[in-house]
Image (cartoon, rainbow, N blue to C red):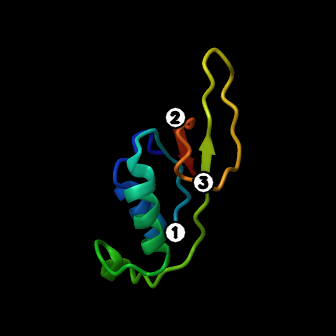
Amino acid sequence: MDAYLGSGTTAAVAMKMGRDFLGIEQGPHIATHCVNRLRAVRDGEPGGISPLVGWMGGGRLRVLLAPVEAHSDLNICGRRRLNCPSLRLRVFA
């Protein structure tokens, strides 16, 4: 679990090593950096530890967007849009 996903490096390495991972990010760069990077990893991106582990791509990436309402419980939904301004917490699984 990576509670501060950032650019997705921990998730990328976990994916290449065949590990399950959960990354959480609330910044807008989740749409511009994280999702694109992890899709590239899934599709066989050759950088980083790829040569060491024989990474050829594969796996599954799910992006869950969770709206956070003021003074309410966290309500997780499977929205497909990445540019919804009402979303403050975004979750990778």
The answer to whether 15 appears left or right of 45 in the picture is: right
Residue found at x 70% / y 32% = 75
Q: Amino acid at mark 2?
A: Arg
Q: Mark 2 packing: few (<14 Cα in 10 Å), some, or many (20+)?
A: some
Which amino acid, by three-letter code, is at mark 3? Arg
Q: Is residue 22 left or right of residue 6?
A: right
Above or below — where is 6 with respect to 71? Answer: below
Residue bearing mark 3:
81
For numbered disc 2, what is the local secondary structure?
A: loop
Locate residue 2 relative to residue 51 in the image: left or right.
right
Q: Which residue is mark 2?
A: 88
Q: x and y percent of residue 63 in the render?
A: 59, 55
Real-space CA distance between mark 3 and mark 2, rounded to the nearest whole angstrom: 13 Å
Q: Amino acid at mark 1?
A: Gly
Answer yes or no: is residue 87 visible.
yes
Q: Which residue is mark 1?
A: 18
